[in-house]
Image (tube, rainbow, N blue to C red):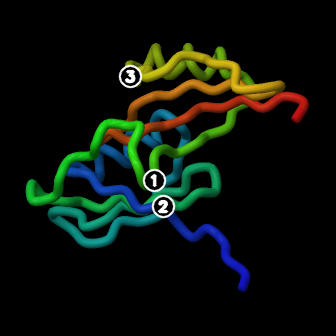
Amino acid sequence: MNYRCDHVHLRSRDAITAAAFYRDTFGAREVKRVGADPVERVVIDLGGLTLFIEQVGDDVNPAVRTPCLGIEHIGLATDDIEAAVDDLTARGVPLRMGITQRGPGLRIAFFEGPDGALIEILERKGV
């Protein structure tokens, strides 16, 4: 068998605003919208990763605070973690964990995105 990533599916009480966050903050590109008034789903391309952001109502439970079981975070690579942390902090994205060395050539930081989504920013050098 051969498997490949097709998409990550997020749920949001405001899919359009959540998609705008990923577009404005990380340069994601909106691919399409499904449904109208309200939108059912916004599909975006986040650096080659397809995200489905589904519009949901109040009957869907809010995300649990990480760490948790299941899909825990989205990891986004950068060449300059200090600049990325400064940029995201200046944009008002909540910092959950500052820059941490995780081994030779690997540094990470965590931010909180829409609907409690945890976003890891990572820099790999010489690995």
Against 12, residue 105 (above or below) is above
Q: Residue 117 appears at what percent x and percent y? A: 38, 42
Quadrant for the C terminus, please: top right
Please, what is the three-letter code of the amino acid marked with disc 1?
Answer: Ile
Question: What element does badge 2 sit on?
Answer: strand
Please, what is the three-letter code of the amino acid marked with disc 2?
Answer: Val
Q: Which residue is mark 1?
A: 71
Residue at left offset 25%, top offset 72%? 35
> Residue 13's mark?
none
Sequence-earlier tag: 2 or 1: 2
| Mark 2 or 1: the one toward you | 1
Against 21, residue 10 (above or below) is below
Q: Dot 3, crowdedness within 10 Å: few (<14), some or many (≥20)? A: some
Sequence-earlier tag: 1 or 3: 1
How far is disc 1 from disc 3 in space, using C-alphas?
20 Å
- Quadrant of the image occupied by residue 11: bottom left
Please, what is the three-letter code of the amino acid marked with disc 3?
Answer: Pro
Question: What element does badge 1 sit on?
Answer: loop
Question: What element does badge 3 sit on?
Answer: loop
Sequence-earlier tag: 3 or 2: 2
Badges 2 and 1: C-beta atoms under 8 Å apart?
yes
> Residue 94's mark?
3
Q: Residue 56 appears at what percent x and percent y? A: 19, 60
Front-most of 97 and 123? Answer: 97
Q: Which residue is mark 2?
A: 8
Front-most of 114 and 68? Answer: 68
Q: Residue 79 appears at what percent x and percent y? A: 75, 28
Q: Residue 78 appears at what percent x and percent y? A: 69, 32
Quadrant for the N terminus, please: bottom right
Against 14, residue 66 (above or below) is above
Against 17, residue 107 (above or below) is above
Image position of 99 (left or right of 79): left
